[in-house]
Amino acid sequence: MPAIKKAIIIGGGPAGLATALRLHQKNNIQCTIYELRPEPTTIGGAIGIPSNGLRLLDRLGVYQSLAARGSLDSQLILHSSQGSMLGEADWMNHAAEKTGFGYMRIKRGDIVDVMVEAVQNAGIPLAFGKRIVRIREAEDTITASFSDGTEDSADILIGCDGIHSAVRTRYVDPDAQPEYTGIAGSFSLLSTSSLPEHLRPNPGLNATFTPDGLFALTPCTPSGDELFWFFSRETPIEESEDTRDGWEIRRRDAVANFQSILLETLKDVKGHWGETLRTVVELTDTIHFFPVYHLPPDGRWSRGRAVLLGDAAHAMSPHAGQGVSMAMEDVFALSRLLADRTASLDEMSRRFQAVRRPRIKEMVQKAQANRDLRKRTGPWGLWMKEVAIKSGLLAYNWLGLDARGFGQGYLEYDIETQDF
């Protein structure tokens, strides 16, 4: 394969920004990023990034700047609906010891801010308000056409434009459409100081199951002065409904009536913890509502000189906490393969997928297992779930399984040590 000298990157989120940084730093490839929105987006709440993703962000040179904005506590505290504590565990202390990185909860807008600054400092062009409308290939180039009439050509085009990727739908795999998972979420951010001091949660991820789903609360800044909370639950939509209209009706209802809906859900959570959750809801002015979609696992990830990375290729539900990390692993895998000039683009794609598809499948299975815990259950089912959680945490801590790294191997994974 002739040397790749120029790349077009579609998407200015974490995946696209990381791709440009890595190819610029490691491969000496001239990159230009094109983003649909008119400015860097702050859409989204707070994102969890575990060890495997943080290690790669450090290799990109942005970890310290991210750590200055995010919370670095990996403690998991589970509360019962009766208000007692089911148990707690540091769910990645072994991975942190092995990799040098633990867990970060950080606002998505802060990730984008840090990475945009890194891209600009590197002199990488980043253009906003660019909607791609056409992709076409010649023998040795690929060209992107935009709605404003401009075009750009390069040796490779990389789609990092998320689950609703225009690169995928217009060129690589138009048949791969997002599928609803059956789970929808609500989230918001809240100043910690607005809570009475006696109701402020312990550091870490505090969570409780209700008959309707999972409610969780966690700091997302270094000082803990801002809290991120979310509620995810099973939310069916009738097959006969128009999907767009159906979700718009549900979104309006969820946003307009979130306090009454959540207070009804949380009314039976007892004790100090129940008071904390209800107060958090009462102090929240507005929420964001989102149905959770994923992509079918067997879609195409490349076509000719066009490649998909991250959610554009394999969007999964967020319940494994691996969305950003999987995108980072994709970026580093692509960088390694582009450095090998002996392979054709088709061979590069084959080797990429041989390593990445099994890894993505593993993370999808973890996400599905965690997603199922959010499904509706009756009082008896909730009690059984809490007993199982409490017993599991007791065994985990008593047997020292955390120190042995039980269940943490996937967090210690290093894409740069894999055999391609």
Image (cartoon, rainbow, N blue to C red):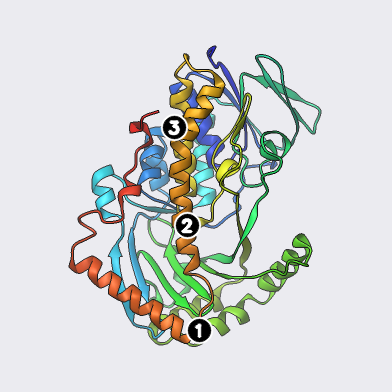
Label 1, residues with CA under 10 Å away: few <14, some 14-19, many ≥20 = few
Q: How far across and how far down the image is residue 261, in percent?
A: 61, 80
The amino acid on which the numbered mark 2 sits, given as a three-letter code, is Ala
Residue annotated with mark 2: 367
Is 25 in front, or is 194? 25
Label 2, residues with CA under 10 Å away: few <14, some 14-19, many ≥20 = some
Q: How far across and how far down the image is residue 11, in percent?
A: 62, 37
Q: The residue tagged with tag 3: helix, strand or loop?
A: helix
What residue do we see at 66% from left, 45% from top? 176
The amino acid on which the numbered mark 3 sits, given as a three-letter code, is Phe
- Which numbered mark, 1 or 3, is in the foreground of this view? 1
Spatial CA distance of label 1 from label 3 is 45 Å
- Which numbered mark, 2 or 3, is in the foreground of this view? 2
Residue annotated with mark 1: 378
The quadrant the C terminus occupies is top left
Spatial CA distance of label 2 from label 3 is 22 Å
Residue 332 is labelled as 3
Label 3, residues with CA under 10 Å away: few <14, some 14-19, many ≥20 = many
Q: The residue tagged with tag 1: helix, strand or loop?
A: loop
Q: Residue furthest top?
A: 2
What residue do we see at 42% from left, 45% from top? 66
| Residue 353 seen in this snapshot | yes
The answer to whether residue 42 is left or right of residue 191 is right
Is 321 in front, or is 300? 300
The amino acid on which the numbered mark 1 sits, given as a three-letter code, is Gly
